[in-house]
Image (cartoon, coloured by chain):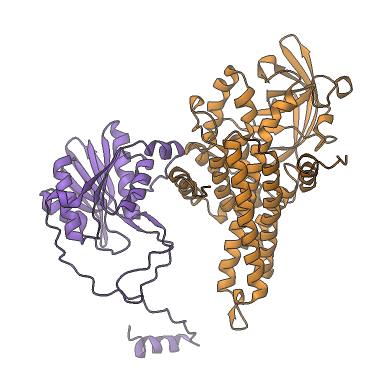
Chain colours: A purple, B orange
Amino acid sequence: MKILVPVKRVPDPATTIRVLPDGSGIATDNVKWVINPFDEIAIEEALRIKEKQGSGEVVLISVGQTAWQEQLRTGLAMGADRAILVKADTPLDTLAIARAIAKVASDEKPELIIIGKQAIDDDSNQIGQMLAEMLGWPQATFASKVELAGEKCTVVREVDGGLETVAFPMPAVITTDLRLNEPRYASLPGIMKARKKPLNEIAVDSLGVDLAPKLKIKTLNAPEKRQAGRKVASVEELVQVLHTEAKVI
Amino acid sequence: MDFELTDSQKEIVEGVRALCGRFPDEYWRGKDQRKEFPNEFYQAVAEAGYLGIAIPEEYGGSGLGITEGALVMKEVAYAGAMNAASSIHLGIFGLAPLIRHGSEEIKRRYLPRVISGQMHVSFAVTEPDAGNDITHIKTFARREGDYYIINGRKVFTTKAQEAHKMLLLTRTTPVEQVKKKTDGMTLFFADVDRNAIEVRELLKLGRHAVDTNMLFIDNLKVSAADLVGEEGRGFHTLLDGLNPERILIAAEAVGIGRSVVDRAVRYAKERIVFGRPIGQNQAIAHPLADAYAKLEVAELMMMKAAWLFDHNKPCGPEANIAKLRAAEAGFEACDRAVQTLGGYGYMQEYDVERFFRECRMLKIAPVSQEMVLNTISEHVLKLPRSY
């Protein structure tokens, strides 16, 4: 089985993010870049499926700049078989990225696309759903359990108030939730082998898809600084304050 | 001159960091308090293939150099200080004599098991009456047919509680009967056979998760096939492991130093006294800046020594100097971190005291700072030998 895993490069969750003074973006100096943690879960799931089945191919894909190779190499070191970097010299919006991935997917013909439910930088939560629509495939979002049996796939989804189990035929798109698995870290032999695995580059312009931006980020603002808390003397006062000041009860 | 790490080296560093990230401070604090060997960490390191980093690919290793080994050990010490480093340290450098001088059979039989983590290895060299004057060891191996019968005592043997095998240095000709004191010694890759060896754990200042022992060896029977190198050439065989060991120890000291400086800096930014973060006071800031600068210098020296070793160039003075400076810089950084945290620095919950205790060892082992200075005086400056 061939599984395609789209991977996004994002700032390390432990990095302190600084918004540029003009609000056009974040300061990228001293930022450590990593694979989007939800995509890392997607890679892990794809590898587990391959290992369980004893054969198959896990292909990573990124739509980004040359530097994104670093994250693809990390994914290859985890155990993916090969990677495709769709090279875009300038950042694209979500829809354009989904179109590019869908185009490559229609050539690669994977049985599954497994992707993080969202990227931790912009929290869009869109690519997986867009891919399913563009390819005309079933989708199972927020997966916390994935099981394959023949042509069928069963996914347990995390939904408000509980779990939902869905079954669908493949090819299909699955987006991963946090509790699906704990991703492995690359082993030393894995790191050494990753250097020799194929990492192909395709120019995004050569795909012939509409890349025109539909989304414009007007400005980014840093969240307001948290104010210190205050102590109240009694439960009565607490209730009073919650009622009159916070207006929550 | 190129000071940049290669892409693979950077990836190795990231890989080790990811692994170490699964073992937080609480893990190491708990292991140290309970004097428990860090089996989970050891297994994770083995499974990720790092124990084989410097072992040739034909025996299942990755065949990388001491530079990569040092980068790994720096990260390991950064995360878990010597409790982490000493649990795997020997697997990474200690088998150099075996790899260079061991028979094909020994290598094929044992190296894969060391890499997989199934087999722990100890280094039994130092004796109660022979430390830096290693030629005066008394442990004696007497040949009997296809076997050697060994008797003697060893001290400061790390991990002997876990070890299945040990690199054991013996005399096969008494020191009085050889022309050169360094002749007449023989190295074995011997079983730690509990029927013939009493392993007695020693209590120590720190690094409580990894045991240090005294060995009483009483008629230990070792097959002649387990002899490493040539009979009588054991001292020279062992020498191949010494420079890499100093380089790795330097890397570990730098890792510890960097860890405690980072911890102290974090604390100095957050701790408010007299209405401002204590790090705003130069009395706090300067010692940390100074510790950082010294660590940078020590790391440069360590990397130079590693580069020389990996390029098959002589690196004795450099490896020794790296160990000297790194042990000093690492321990000074620990002391300053404890001082920065004040009363909390002395408390186990804040971890820097653990780094402080563990780093102190590196000024003594594997060779004392004083003996390093002797080496530099004699072999680099060509001053008359003082002892």
B188 or A44, which lies in front?
B188
| Residue B143 in the image: above or below residue B37 | above
Residue B334, horizontal then vertical, whole percent = 67, 59
Check the picture and name the quadrant holding the C terminus of chain B.
top right
Up-down: is B275 above or below B319? below
Nearer to the camera, B196 or A15: A15
> From where the camera sits, is residue A128 visible?
yes
Given the current orientation, which residue lies at the most extreme left position?
A136
Q: Position of residue B176 (x, y in %)?
A: 89, 23
Q: Is residue B270 left or right of residue A216?
A: right
Residue B256 x/y as whole percent: 62, 54
> In percent of the image, x 60 and y 35: which residue is there?
B91
Q: Quadrant of residue B372?
A: top right
Q: Residue at x 64, y 52 (%)?
A: B298
Q: Please, which residue is most extreme toward the top here?
A: B145
**A195 relative position to A209: left or right:** right
How many labels, in total? 0
B250 to B354, vertically: above or below? above
Q: Position of residue A180 (x, y in %)?
A: 32, 50
Viewer-proximal residue among A58 and B38: A58
Residue under the point 61% across and 76% down: B278
A125 w.r.t. B379: above or below: below
- Residue B25 lies in what quarter of the image? bottom right
- Does residue A139 appear in this view? no
Instruction: Name which residue lies at 31% across and 75% down.
Output: A23
* Residue B105, quarter of the rendered image: top right
